[in-house]
């Protein structure tokens, strides 16, 4: 056989992209077994009457743990958000005080609006709201 020979060992008549989940004798392939388990889980989650007591208890415990985790995570986020808000407020107050001091020194003979606009432009802040 030539070294540049290309051979294909697919399944005769099978379409591209279609997976085969059954062997010719009707038994499930490994992929078919995984798929069947996944479908059973999906079916059981929709129809809870199919669940055994143990499975139902396990799902309830799982949901309770997820709820506890969500509540704890929200508390951590709220603490971080509070810290960030306070830091931003302090920074904003300092910036406004700086502008006011510079404006008072620079704007003795200039109208207030013009002085504020000049200072805002100096610090790279927008002079008008969108």
Image (spheres, rainbow, N blue to C red):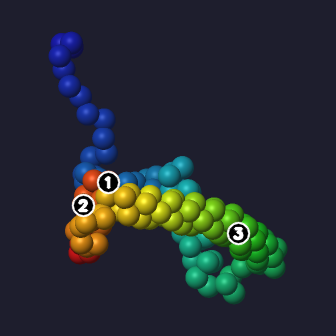
Q: Nearer the viewer, mark 3 or mark 2?
A: 2
Residue 54, image quadrant: bottom right
Whether residues under marks 1 and 3 lie with C-beta atoms below 8 angstroms apart, the answer is no
What's the residue at 31%, 45% (across, down)? 11
- Of residues 20 and 89, the one nearer the viewer is 89
Mark 3, residues whose alpha carbon is within 10 Å: few (<14), some, or many (≥20)?
few
* Residue 117 placement (x, y as % from top left): 25, 66
SS type, badge 3: helix
Identify the residue under disc 1: 123
Residue 125, image quadrant: bottom left
Residue 109 is left or right of residue 48, and the answer is left
Whether residues under marks 3 and 2 lie with C-beta atoms below 8 angstroms apart, the answer is no
Identify the residue under disc 2: 118
SS type, badge 1: loop
Residue farthest along the front direction in this orientation: 109
Q: Is the residue 1 above or below the residue 115 in the image?
A: above
Q: Nearer the viewer, mark 1 or mark 2?
A: 2
Q: In whole angstroms, how far apart are the C-alphas of marks 3 and 2?
A: 43 Å
């Amino acid at each position: 056989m030539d070294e540049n020979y290309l051979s294909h060992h697919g399944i005769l008549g099978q379409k591209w992209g279609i997976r085969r989940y059954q062997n010719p004798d009707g038994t499930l392939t490994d992929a078919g077994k995984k798929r069947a388990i996944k479908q059973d889980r999906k079916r059981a989650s929709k129809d809870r009457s199919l669940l055994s007591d143990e499975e139902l208890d396990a799902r309830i415990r799982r949901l309770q743990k997820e709820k506890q985790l969500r509540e704890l995570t929200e508390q951590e986020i709220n603490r971080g958000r509070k810290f960030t808000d306070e830091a931003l407020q302090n920074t904003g107050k300092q910036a406004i005080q700086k502008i006011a001091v510079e404006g008072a020194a620079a704007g003795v003979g200039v109208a207030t609006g013009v002085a504020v606009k000049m200072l805002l432009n100096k610090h790279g802040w927008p002079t008008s709201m969108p």
